[in-house]
Image (cartoon, rainbow, N blue to C red):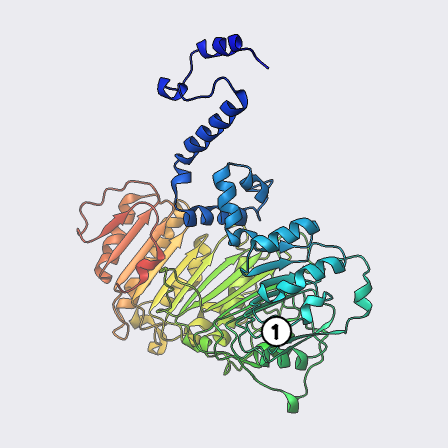
Amino acid sequence: MASDHDSDQLLRIPSPLPEDILRHLPTRNHTAMRDCLFKLQYLINATAAVNRLPVELLTEILRLRLVCAQYPVLNPKPSLVTVLLVCRHWYNTAVSSAVLWTKITLRMPLQVLEKYLRRSRGAALSLDTRLIKASAPQVFVDALSPHIDRITHLATRSFEAYVEHPMMSLSSLILNDSEPIAQHRSSSLRSSVVSIHGKCLPQLESLTLVGLRTRVRIVNARCLTRLELVSMSYDSWDGLFISLSGCPALEYLELNEFSADSMAVVTPAGRQTIELPHLRKLYLSQFEGHRSLSFFLAHVALPRTATIVIIMWKESIDDAMDGIVDLSPGYTVFADAVPHDKTLLPMFSTIQKIKIKIKPERVEVEGFMLAALDHTGVREPSVGLYCDFGDVHNTRSLQKQLMIELGSLFSSATTLRICIADDECYDMRLDPTGIESWKSLYDMFPHIEAIDFAGPSLGFFDEFLSDIGPTPLPQRAHHAPLPWPKLKRARFECAAMNSDAYDIIRGITASICNRQLDASVERLQRLIIVLADVDGPSNLRRCLRQLRSKTEELVCTIGKQDLVLDDLDPSLLVLHGDVNETMLSES
């Protein structure tokens, strides 16, 4: 022990503490002085800004920290222990907050599990047993048994005993058998049918089934609003339809990587319609077999306000040569996946805007109701059809095929947007015989009021512009009517550079001027032209003057090049940069 002389020497060292504090320190007793300094440190820590927060707010911060711990990239070493070791205030706050001790996993040591159960003090529990490699040891089952009615979220495997245990408070259930596991004793004793019964799970709202090899039966799940089936299959369509009929309150239904080709098809006399009157969203991804997908959609009755998202995959063409692939005769993109009779899918008839984006390896078709805006103001498609390809396809051949199929998918569109994304894959060398793609659109959608076409080159616009505004009326045979006589708003965008861009403007000018010679068509309210670049400002000025006289409002965007157009009408707006497609709206 240090002598009094040593203590006096220590106190001679300059201290950061004020004199009035130093006078009260028990300098003669090192243990007492250490305790006193510890108390001072506790008081100093209590003045930190984070520790002056209300306990409820600090608890919420700690809870969010534990939620972020589920993402190792953001938090490489997550642990509630690190929270407890920060300081005494955090320790006391964490221990007294039941919500921080509600996430249970059977990978915990038994002593830790018991501590979690004790400190959660009757709060709702979340239990995850998926990470263990075999059935839970009986000692853990016994420890959880008194608390089984507190479980509101359960993630486990289909062979665990918890699946068939009545849980009056369970709201979310995940059964995941996708990962291989070691042989367990209970698997041979379990039934080959997993039963999800509303009487045993009266509060169940969300159910996710992943990779189950056993049959699943859902009975009278009247509170179930969300159902996800991932990597699943049934023996027959009857099995799937019976399960869906047991979920009358469904609002979200997802079938992901659903194996349907091996399912027995119901005989025509035994076909039934599944009514899902409350469904808000149907999500179908990688549904095996487009014929099976069409069969499923033909037997599901959805409300008009529901949203459908379908993501499909087209396999690679075995005999395809290296390079860009053309679609073969009889090839369909979406038509074989959507039933021709869409009586049970009334949202298709409400589509007023069609938005198409074509890439070499992906096609996107989205249908919108013009009034369908969510609370954030972001427009969400009522119908979304997406197809990924195993090969790089000629985007022009994809475009021509979609022109043929659109009429069987939608019938009431008034706005049409088509975007071709890649110039290198827009191959013009196609057989000109057969159905002309653009003309088929004129017949399918006679009530079009707004168009928005974005293409990579002059060739994309040539075919269209030659029809929308053909030769003047005196030279046309039999006074054939112009396509889309109700057209009011148009937007053209091209990534082509220099001379091609000017040719496009010249073609647009000729088409629009020729249209206005026909008394049966309406005058354009708004015309938008977006170009990457253009040569010849004087020629451009002449075209813009002609266009300005044929439309009420003209908007022209030409890359970043400054053009002097002061001699034009002041109402002509020339911008630099991007023009948003929402400018096509009437507002």
Q: In which quarter of the image is residue 370?
A: bottom left
Q: In this view, does 531 lie above or below 552?
A: above
Q: In this view, does 316 lie above or below 305?
A: above
At x 60%, y 40%, the residue is: 77
At x 50%, y 49%, the residue is: 96
Question: Which residue lies under the disc numbered 1?
Answer: 293
The C terminus: image quadrant: bottom left
Q: In which quarter of the image is residue 126?
A: bottom right
Secondary structure state at the residue bearing disc 1? helix
Give the percent coordinates (x, y) of residue 447.
36, 75
Does any portion of residue 319 appear in the rendered image?
A: no
At x 50%, y 83%, the residue is: 343
* Frontmost residue, 105 versus 240: 105
Does any portion of residue 251 appear in the rendered image?
A: yes
Give the percent coordinates (x, y) of residue 282.
53, 70
Q: Is residue 150 above or below residue 6?
A: below
Give the percent coordinates (x, y) of residue 437.
48, 68
Amino acid on which the number 1 mark rests in the picture? Leu
Horizontal side, residue 491 vs residue 190: left or right? left
* Frontmost residue, 188 versus 319: 188
Horizontal side, residue 75 vs residue 42: left or right? right
